[in-house]
Image (cartoon, rainbow, N blue to C red):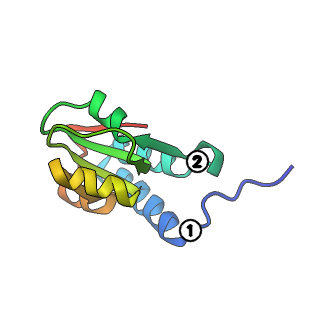
Amino acid sequence: MAKRTGPTNPYLRQLIESLRKKSLELNVPFWKTVAEKLSKSTRRKVEVNLSKIERNTNSGDVVIVPGIVLATGQLTKPVTVAAWRFSPAAVRKIKDKGKILTIEELAQDNPKGSNVKIIS
C-alpha cells in the first residue's frame, strides 16, 4: 500500500500550513477544519457547484469552499465566496452578483472566521 503524502502543489501545502498556524496562534478551530478539508486526497477533494451555494446561503453571507467552485447553477443573491480554486465560468457568474476572495484574503479579513459558512 502506498504511503499517503498529501497535496503535492507547493502553494496548497503553504496555505494548509499557514491555516494550521493561524488556528494555533488565535486558538480558532475553524481554520484547522478548513486546513484538514484542503489536505484530503485527490479522490476526496471538495467540488461545489453554484447551485449548492445558492441553496445553502442567504443574501450577504460569507462562504468558504475548501476546494473547487464549479459553474453549474445560478447565483441570484449577493454572496461572498472564498475558495482554493474557481472555474472560469464560476468566476463570471459570481462576479455578476457577489464577490470572490481567496482563502488567504478571507483569513486576513476575518481572522476568527466568525459568521463564515463552510460548504463542502
Identity, as a three-letter code, of the amino acid under mark 1 = Asn
- Whether residue 56 is visible here, answered yes or no, is no
Q: Is residue 81 left or right of residue 31?
A: left
- Disc assigned to residue 9: 1
Q: Is residue 63 above or below residue 88?
A: above
The residue depicted at 34 percent of the width and 38 percent of the height is 73
Q: How many marks?
A: 2
The residue depicted at 47 percent of the width and 58 percent of the height is 16
Q: For the view shown, which residue lies furthest in the bottom direction?
A: 10
Q: What SS does tag 2 mark?
A: loop
Q: What SS does tag 1 mark?
A: loop
Q: Position of residue 14 (x, y in %)?
A: 47, 68
Q: Position of residue 62 (x, y in %)?
A: 21, 43
> The C terminus is located in which quarter?
top left
- Whether residue 34 is visible here, answered yes or no, is yes
Q: Is residue 35 left or right of residue 96?
A: right
Residue beneath disc 2: 40
**How far apart are labels 2 and 1 at the CA level?**
13 Å
Q: Residues within 10 Å of mark 1 (few under 14, many from 20)?
A: few
Q: Is residue 100 left or right of residue 47?
A: left
In the image shown, does 6 or 42 lie closer to the viewer?
A: 42
Q: Quadrant of residue 44?
A: top right
In the image shown, does 1 or 65 lie closer to the viewer?
A: 65
Could you tell me if the residues under marks 2 and 1 are in contact, i.e. CB atoms within 8 Å? no
Q: Position of residue 5 (x, y in %)?
A: 69, 59
Q: Position of residue 94 (x, y in %)?
A: 24, 50
Task: Please report whichever mark, 2 or 1, sits nearer to the chain's N-terminal start.
Answer: 1
Identity, as a three-letter code, of the amino acid under mark 2 = Lys
- Disc assigned to residue 64: none
Q: Residues within 10 Å of mark 2 (few under 14, many from 20)?
A: some
